[in-house]
Amino acid sequence: MNRVVSFMLNKKVFAFVLVFVVMVLVIGNGSAFAYGEDIQSSLTDLLNWVSKILGGLAVGFGIVFTGLRMAMHDEHALKNGMLIIGGGILIFAAMNIVNLLQAIFKGA
């Protein structure tokens, strides 16, 4: 059993599995397979979807990270955890921020 666990914890295997899962999610979305003028809106939808997924994952990881590190009495846990959570929220809201900036500077 220990051989299986050590094999799964190998960094190269973990990186390969992570890249494979991300590629399957991105390619399997199907909204990028459009023709003509629909390609821009399809790619925008795809990027919006990816940013929402990655932002949500970062926020969830930040919450778990902060809780675990605070349980281990790490004095810098709250600062580092809040940075991760803030980055996840920024990624999650990236498309809305871009739309807001476009609306502000469109009239200028």
Image (spheres, helix red, strand yellow):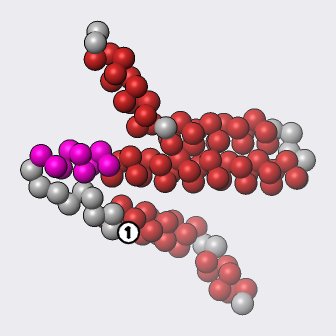
Magenta-highlighted residues: 37-45
| Image quarter in which the N terminus is found | bottom right
Q: Residue at x 42, y 69 (%)?
A: 20
Quick check: is 39 in the magenta stretch? yes
| Residue placed under numbered mark 1 in the picture | 24
Where on the picture, by quarter, is residue 23? bottom left
Quick check: is 91 in the magenta stretch? no
Which residue is the extreme one toward the top? 108
Q: How many marks?
A: 1
Q: Position of residue 21 (x, y in %)?
A: 45, 68
Q: Position of residue 27 (x, y in %)?
A: 31, 64
Which residue is the extreme one toward the left? 36
Q: Position of residue 80 (x, y in %)?
A: 72, 39
Q: Residues within 10 Å of mark 1 (few under 14, many from 20)?
A: few
* 94, 73: nearer the viewer: 94
* 30, 78: nearer the viewer: 30
Where on the picture, by quarter, is residue 81? top right
From the image, give the main secondary structure of the stretch colored magenta.
helix
Q: Residue at x 61, y 77 (%)?
A: 8
Which residue is the extreme one toward the bottom? 1
Amino acid type, mark 1: Val
* 101, 19: nearer the viewer: 101
| Image quarter in which the C terminus is found | top left
Q: Residue at x 85, y 48 (%)?
A: 70
Residue 66's place in the image compared with 76, above or below, is below
**For this view, does 32 lie left or right of residue 49?**
left
Q: Residue at x 40, y 25 (%)?
A: 100
Secondary structure state at the residue bearing disc 1: helix
**For this view, does 29 lie left or right of residue 78?**
left
Q: Position of residue 94 (x, y in %)?
A: 45, 36
